[in-house]
């Protein structure tokens, strides 16, 4: 990358142009608050995203996530290098659509201590046929705050039914079709 600074050492222009195998890694640097953003080359299939405060008594990295991609450029892992228990493993179907996200602590290529998960069952057209959220990672999908949202759609992909889940007291309303005037 290539940057130009003004008199106050502020980046005024930045040319981004990392190609596979090029070094050094892409870096954007500005003065004071947010000071550094790095996006290293992804020839290894992993990117490291780093946000840091510089020029403090001690530089502080407040966000650092290692991203791993599959051969179709889908993110399959987001490993949090700062906060324990916030790694995420993403699972995709054969159409490259997200069908599961497990959050917890990564260990040997899987989530060892799951703290949260979400699951989607998708129709061929991508509608959410079933959406399940387990906010404490116990795999029950029925605790307070969990979702087990079973939906149906008509042939033109309009949501036609969405029954209440354990965390809802009534079913959400669906929007009326264009041929049905709204109630007044």
Image (cartoon, rainbow, N blue to C red):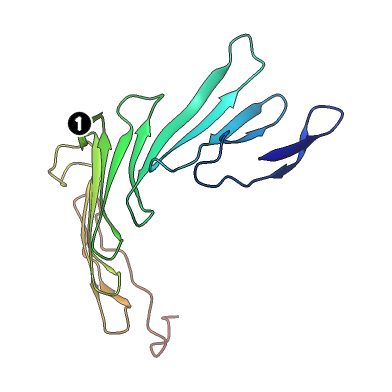
User: Looking at the image, can residue 145 be seen?
Assistant: no
Residue 177 vs residue 130, the one in the foreground: 130
Q: Residue at x 51, y 31 (%)?
A: 50
Residue 72, position in %: x, y? Answer: 35, 57
* Residue 80 in view here: yes
Quadrant (top left, top right, bottom left, bottom right) of the N terminus: top right
Q: Quadrant of residue 173?
A: bottom left
- Give the x, y percent position of residue 123: 23, 71
User: Of 173 and 23, which appears nearest the observer?
Assistant: 23
Q: Position of residue 31 (x, y in %)?
A: 73, 26
The percent position of residue 135, horizontal first and vertical second, equals: 25, 40
Residue shown at the point (39%, 54%) measured from the top left = 73
Residue annotated with mark 1: 108
Q: Is residue 14 left or right of residue 61?
A: right
Give whichever of 165, 32 is nearer the camera: 32
Q: Is residue 61 left or right of residue 180?
A: right
Q: Is residue 28 above or below residue 32?
A: below
Task: Report the side of 81 relative to 122 (left or right).
Answer: right
- Near mark 1 (Cα within 10 A), the count class, few <14, some 14-19 or many ≥20, is few
Residue under the point 13% across and 42% down: 139
In the image, residue 117 sits, relative to residue 5, either above or below, namely below
Question: Residue at the front extreme?
Answer: 21
């Amino acid at each position: 990358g290539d940057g130009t600074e003004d008199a106050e050492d502020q980046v005024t222009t930045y040319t981004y142009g990392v190609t596979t195998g090029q070094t050094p890694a892409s870096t954007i640097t500005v003065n004071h608050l947010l000071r550094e953003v790095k996006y290293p080359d992804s020839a290894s299939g992993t990117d490291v995203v780093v946000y840091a405060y510089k020029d403090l008594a001690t530089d502080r990295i407040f966000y650092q996530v290692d991203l791993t991609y599959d051969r179709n450029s889908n993110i399959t892992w987001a490993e949090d290098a700062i906060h324990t228990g916030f790694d995420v493993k993403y699972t995709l179907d054969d159409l490259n659509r997200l069908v599961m996200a497990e959050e917890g602590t990564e260990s040997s290529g899987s989530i060892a201590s799951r703290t949260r998960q979400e699951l989607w069952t998708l129709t061929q057209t991508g509608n959410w046929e079933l959406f399940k959220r387990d906010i404490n990672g116990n795999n029950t999908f029925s605790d307070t705050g969990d979702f087990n949202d079973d939906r149906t759609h008509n042939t033109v992909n309009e949501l036609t039914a969405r029954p209440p889940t354990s965390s809802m007291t009534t079913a959400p309303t669906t929007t009326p079709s264009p041929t049905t005037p709204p109630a007044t």
